[in-house]
Image: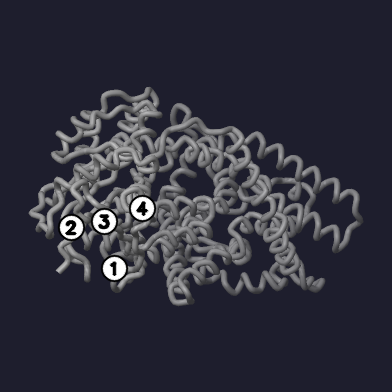
């Protein structure tokens, strides 16, 4: 029987555990794996002041006693004496980052409640003092009921005092923890409040910046004010997308129209002129005009990330996501999907729970990516009046905000249904650390916008341009005979395909022209705009009609219920081949990819149909 006391070194990630472990054990370390799992087991030995040997076990970092990964499960099992082949620790050394006391105290309270002899190593105390933070360790010790030793592990400060404290706790055999069950089962919010109260009581001095951060977080993370603030910020963003973008978008539109007229006047009539003017310039130009609203949207996203607010938004959303069966780990991939679903889906690799990850992949396409913005913008501009419905509140921005909210709510409802059926399982816990608030760097914001503009223009010059040319050829050829009395487009290859599909979507208010937009939009959602521009450039043969913008053309062709149904279709439909390919790769096959396509198309059809018939019944 091994009588050497086993001391467990435990704490949050990035608390300096590894540095403290190295300072205590030096070269007397062993590394292996725990039985049955591929999780590294790191142990070492050191001697107490009285010469007694002690075995030190460096447990994987975790934020809570509710495990959400194999690493965290090992920590949980060792501390509760459930890990195969591992003794129950004789005592605990809880490592905390002195400069991030609030978050680290939350887990420390759970560890102390286990009932094992415990000492706290208040690590990186020098970094806290550098930031203007002074902690009364005696007061902190009194609040926690355990010894607190200030340390700087990388400089071996406080190591001797820590050994003395450990020596007073260590025994020759494991002690069974009684545990404070009230604390062990307390919810995260309650633990955070207790941790904050203890941190305030033990902090004797802090910098103005830290005080300002705490005061700001008291508002930003408030259970009632926080969600209202987040909704307000998002609402302002979508108002700005329309109000700020109108002038530069109009300038780009005028430039594209002038380019089309110049090329049309300079070239003789024929195949090449039609291809360039009606295909490339009309189609690609209809998408490029929406570069300003896309950049405005990304400006705000980059701004929120740079200031440190985006993580606060994740914290607020975590409560909502837990109700539908997801953890906060899913928030960042879903947030990334607002830019593009492809990096969002790839970011799910950070989610350890396989069912949680699969659910996140299946709902990521419901996040309203930037590719949908041109579609939303052109239809909203065509059918929603440009008027205010309140002080500084535009109706067009309000509708855009509603579409984004519809996507989020759709994703949450889908997650709720999936987590209770095909991906059934308990939601894993999630903890996060709040970064400091900081002023955004102008250079970083500008670089981010420049990168996004290049990506958008590259898509316009490659995928969208190629798809537009193919569509132009399909709607232009073959040419109808002289005695053909229907629209020429009906005789074309694309027209015949669209006419075959139209009966399927006619019940939800869609016509042939919309089908011609939906099919090529499978390549990229923005192609729907260029496809409509190309189709109308061909069908409107008179010069006066061709000079009108796509927005003006739509106003005269679609009833309002059809326009609303078209918007709702794009909220839910998975119209992007690249996204489909990534889902197949990340799920290792067509099973879940086919499932995703089926449920999203069914959801889009039902939602668009309900919107069309409701709007028609209301006489809109």
Q: In the image, is residue 441 above or below residue 451? A: above
Of pointers 2 and 3, the one earlier in the residue sequence: 2
Q: Are marks 2 and 1 in contact (CB under 8 Å)?
A: no
Q: Secondary structure at mark 3?
A: strand
Q: Secondary structure at mark 1?
A: loop
Locate residue 264 relative to residue 545 in the image: left or right.
Answer: right
At which x and y percent is residue 478?
77, 73
Of pointers 4 and 3, the one earlier in the residue sequence: 4
Measuring 72% from the left and 71% from the top, which residue is drawn there?
492
Q: Secondary structure at mark 2?
A: loop
Classify mark 3: residues with Cα within 10 Å, few (<14), some (14-19) or many (20+).
many
Q: CA distance from mark 2 to mark 1?
A: 42 Å
User: In front of the other: label 4 or label 1?
Assistant: 4
Q: CA distance from mark 4 to mark 3?
A: 11 Å
For the residue pair 56 and 276, the one nearer the viewer reads as 56
Q: CA distance from mark 4 to mark 1?
A: 46 Å
Q: Which mark, residue 424? A: 1
Q: Which mark, residue 26? A: 4
Disc 2 designates what residue? 5
Q: In the image, is residue 367 above or below residue 519? A: above
User: In front of the other: label 2 or label 1?
Assistant: 2
Disc 3 designates what residue? 56
């Amino acid at each position: 029987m091994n009588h050497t006391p086993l001391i467990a070194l435990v704490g949050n990630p990035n608390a300096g555990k590894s540095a403290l472990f190295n300072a205590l054990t030096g070269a007397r370390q062993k590394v292996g794996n725990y039985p049955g799992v591929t999780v590294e087991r790191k142990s070492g030995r050191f001697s107490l002041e009285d010469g007694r040997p002690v075995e030190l076990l460096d447990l994987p970092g975790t934020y809570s006693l509710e495990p959400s990964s194999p690493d965290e499960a090992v920590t949980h099992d060792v501390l509760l004496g459930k890990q195969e082949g591992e003794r129950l620790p004789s005592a605990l050394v809880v490592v905390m980052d002195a400069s991030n006391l609030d978050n680290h105290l939350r887990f420390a309270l759970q560890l102390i409640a286990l009932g094992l002899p415990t000492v706290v190593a208040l690590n990186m105390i020098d970094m806290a003092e550098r930031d203007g933070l002074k902690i009364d360790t005696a007061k902190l010790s009194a609040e926690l009921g355990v010894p607190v030793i200030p340390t700087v592990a990388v400089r071996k400060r406080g190591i001797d005092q820590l050994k003395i404290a450990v020596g007073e706790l260590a025994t020759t055999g494991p002690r069974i923890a009684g545990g404070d069950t009230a604390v062990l089962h307390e919810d995260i919010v309650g633990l955070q409040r207790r941790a904050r109260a203890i941190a305030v009581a033990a902090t004797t001095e802090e910098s103005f910046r830290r005080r300002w951060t705490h005061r700001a977080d008291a508002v930003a993370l408030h259970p009632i004010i926080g969600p209202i603030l987040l909704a307000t910020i998002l609402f302002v963003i979508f108002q700005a997308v329309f109000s700020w973008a109108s002038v530069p978008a109009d300038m780009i539109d005028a430039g594209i129209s002038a380019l089309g007229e110049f090329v049309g006047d300079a070239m003789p009539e024929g195949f090449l002129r039609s291809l360039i003017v009606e295909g490339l310039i009309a189609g690609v130009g209809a998408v490029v005009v929406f570069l300003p609203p896309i950049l405005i949207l990304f400006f705000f996203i980059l701004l929120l990330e740079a200031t440190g607010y985006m993580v606060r938004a994740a914290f607020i959303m975590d409560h909502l996501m837990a109700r539908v069966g997801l953890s906060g780990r899913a928030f960042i991939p879903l947030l990334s999907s607002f830019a593009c679903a492809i990096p969002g889906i790839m970011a799910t690799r950070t989610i350890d729970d396989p069912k949680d990850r699969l659910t996140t992949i299946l709902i990521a396409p419901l996040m309203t990516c930037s590719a949908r913005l041109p579609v939303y913008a052109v239809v909203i501009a065509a059918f929603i009046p440009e008027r205010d419905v309140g002080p500084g509140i535009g109706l067009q921005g309000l509708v855009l905000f509603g579409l984004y909210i519809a996507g989020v709510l759709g994703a949450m409802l889908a997650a709720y249904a999936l987590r209770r059926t095909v991906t059934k399982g308990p939601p894993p816990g999630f903890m996060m650390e709040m970064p400091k608030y900081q002023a955004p760097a102008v250079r970083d914001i500008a670089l981010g916008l420049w990168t996004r503009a290049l990506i958008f223009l590259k898509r316009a010059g490659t995928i969208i341009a190629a798809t537009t040319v193919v569509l132009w050829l399909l709607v232009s050829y073959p040419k109808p005979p002289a005695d053909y009395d229907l629209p020429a487009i009906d005789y074309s290859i694309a027209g015949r395909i669209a006419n075959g599909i139209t009966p399927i979507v006619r019940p939800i208010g869609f016509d042939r022209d919309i089908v011609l937009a939906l099919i090529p939009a499978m390549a990229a959602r923005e192609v729907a705009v260029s496809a409509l521009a190309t189709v109308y450039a061909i069908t409107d043969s008179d010069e006066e009609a061709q000079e009108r913008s796509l927005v003006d053309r739509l106003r005269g062709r679609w009833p309002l219920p059809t326009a609303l149904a078209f918007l709702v279709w794009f909220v839910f439909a998975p119209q992007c081949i690249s996204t489909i390919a990534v889902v197949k790769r990340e799920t290792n096959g067509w099973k879940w990819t086919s499932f995703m396509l089926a449920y999203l198309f069914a959801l889009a059809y039902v939602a668009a149909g309900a919107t069309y018939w409701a709007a028609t019944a209301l006489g809109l």
